[in-house]
Image (cartoon, rainbow, N blue to C red):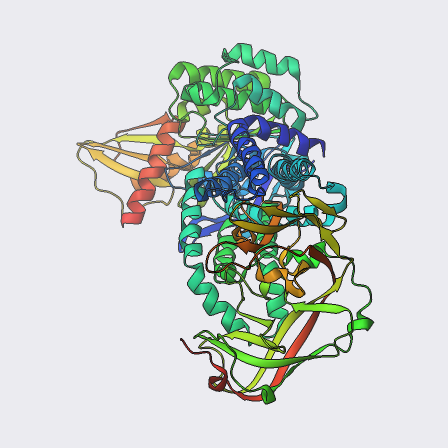
Amino acid sequence: MRQAIHIFCKDARHCRPYIAVVLALTAMSAWLAYRQVLPGAHNVEPLFLSLIPLAWWLTIGAAVQAESLAGDRQFWVTRPYSWKSLLAAKLLFAAAFIGLPVLLSDCLTLLANGFNPLTLIPGLLLRQAWLAGVLGLPFAVAALTRTIRDLVLAGLVFLIFFSLEGILAGLHLSRMATEPAWIRDGAPWLLPVAGLSLAVWQFARRRTTLIRVLALALAPWAPVWTLPSLARFTGPPVPGEARFRNIAVQFDPSRGHAFPGARGGWYYLPVTIAGWPNGLVACQPPGGGRFAKDSPGGLYCVTPGPGGGAWLVLYASPWLPAEGGLSLPMDLAVYEQQDSVTLPSDGGWVRIPGFGDVRVLEKRDWTVLIARTALKPAGPEWSFRLGGQTEDGWWHSLPSDTAPDFPTPLVFRTSGVCLKESGPYSRGSLQHPVLFTPRRLAAVLHRELKIAHIKLADYQGHKP
Amino acid sequence: MSNPIATHNLSKAFRSTEAVRALTLEVPEGGIYALIGPNGAGKTTTIKLLMNILRASAGSAEVLGVDSRRLSPREFARIGYVSENQEMPEWMTVDYFLAYLKPFYPTWDDALAAGLVRQFELPLDRKLRHLSRGMRMKAALASSLAYRPELVVLDEPFTGLDALVRDEFTRSLLERAEGTTILIASHDLADIENFASHVGYIEEGRLRFSEEMGTLAGRFRQVEIAFDAPPPLPAHWPAGWMRPETSGAVLRFIDSRFDAERTAAELGRAFPGARNVEFHAMTLREIFVALALAGRQAKAA
């Protein structure tokens, strides 16, 4: 360990300019994240967002390549370095100058906004795990390249590769809908774990050529890499699966084919969720779907439809069989209602323990209800009752709700709904008190919809 | 103790190119072993195999009694390695470089390090990237001698150095590493000749010979035979006679297996009409050139 710290101190000295930039960007992003939770604040500038991963990429690269693992001319390879100490030093560097600042930034932003970080430790740790997964790529690439120039070139290749991700992801993920569950479950972890394993192997053995070949073989998997659902980790412990054992998703062709508002390019399969216990209110894949990325509906998800009944919305992928059997695994989130709170109309924030902050903000032309949560998906976790009608929070997300979790160090999820506005869409005057009901995630259930035989064309949405 | 360096049929191929072929050599303890050979002969590859920088395709090597593929920090703490094309941490000052390396070596001697810095006149506050080539080599050598290594491995340490720096470098090496086993690969044969105890000649990846310097110097002779008229070359040319040249009535060649009595007898049989025979001792450089040219001719043939 002493050798690891010795190498770490040397790297810290060598990489001072990089560290200064990373710390400055982290501090600035924390400030922007703090400002972003204010109503009407803009999202963090895209240019700024691209600077943070760039700074991480170069900083990790500079630290790892201070003792370059590729090549045969480095002074250190004939010095009494222990590969474990060397690896530990580089990991310590990443933790100290990237992970810790992000953690501190998260905690300070939480505190500044009235959240106690100690109550959000699982979410904070998950963000650190995400960060480790994100940093695993430059770490592995730096371990396989010799110079910063090589590292930057590799970064550009990845940038081009990931810019095609939209297309590739659609192809891969829709194809994966018909693949075994273990592949889909393992996919989010495959790239970071495999990348870090290769990096560790490279540190231990320095088999650069062989490991480069293996790394290239991993590249096609890159588009299936998604961050694991936040809700899985920030929710409370599952209070016994027994309560939910009977919940099952079944295909229900008797409901007919017509889903109102169906979009072209998607299939809408009528399903029934059987065995639903009383008092549980929502059934929605956390994050919008198992493989959901940018699309709010995901590549497929179960969603309540107008007029009752649930629908499974499935992307019309060319890899899906036109007719025949179909097996679709999915995650179902089960939420329990908490005690309701009547919101004051004075515009002040109301702290709801275990949930976050809520307020009704009245302006001249509009009145908006804002729910603000920390390290939680805000959408499905609340509903409100106004004028005798209950509405779910997930239909009402502000733009920031769809912002990526990384690279922006956003700590907060904000969602809201316009309660009153002037003009053609006016809901009229706000005469009733707003009753706010938070929900608690009780469990995330893994289920599989199995259809013995279906002709998918019968359930296809059509362009209006 | 076994020899600090011993290889057995050590081989290394880069795709279809065989850089080192079944190389078997031993470097005795306390010896100064000069590995010589033309460019591309496989000297640097051999040293990189010994230092576990490259992996052997076949065969094995032992360094300080350990399989070279298993060299650990414990062995590297007893080895000093300096190479002409080593990538150094350019951003470090000489002072920081030495201070950084010190904790890696339990046997680091501050007084010795300070002495080396003084002897080499190293500017402590200057970054390595701002040092001349000679100064960089001196810094590398200082950092590799300050912990009194049992084995010093030098790969072309004199390349690009002027005569004065070379002399300083060699003197310091011999003074500070007394009793240390040294393996040195170099083209600078004149310098090596003065201090090497053993020499190995490598060509096209093969070790042509490996022996003590005194033995080598004793068995190579340039033979000059004067005749009354231009001589005809004998039909049977002994294997140890190399590079025959005639100039008028004088025949010159190199005998690589010189033995006064045996050579005289062979000459008597081969050249009964010889008027005068002279034997000249050869320098290491002359031996090297003769071997290299003979190898090139054999390859062309």
Q: Position of residue A13 (x, y in %)?
A: 57, 25
Which corner quadrant of the image does residue A309 belong to?
bottom right
* Of residues B274 and A206, the one drawn nearer to the viewer in this rendering: A206
* Of residues B195 and A405, the one drawn nearer to the viewer in this rendering: A405
Q: Is residue A354 above or below residue A58?
A: below
> Residue at image x 60%, y 89%?
A254
Instruction: State how many labels appear.
Output: 0
> Residue at image x 21%, y 35%?
B246
> Residue at image x 56%, y 32%?
A23
On the rendered image, what quadrant is the N terminus of chain A found in? top right
Q: Position of residue A228 (x, y in %)?
A: 62, 58
Regarding residue A200, the answer to whether it shows in the image is no
Q: Position of residue B46 (x, y in %)?
A: 49, 41
On the rendered image, what quadrant is the C terminus of chain A found in? bottom left
* Of residues A186 and A229, the one drawn nearer to the viewer in this rendering: A229
Q: Is residue A133 above or below residue B51?
A: below
Q: Position of residue B267 (x, y in %)?
A: 34, 37
Q: Is residue A374 above or below residue A382?
A: above
Q: Is residue A187 above or below residue A274?
A: above
Which corner quadrant of the image does residue B289 belong to?
top left
Regarding residue A389, the answer to whether it shows in the image is yes
Which corner quadrant of the image does residue A311 belong to?
bottom right
* Of residues A216 and A388, the one drawn nearer to the viewer in this rendering: A388
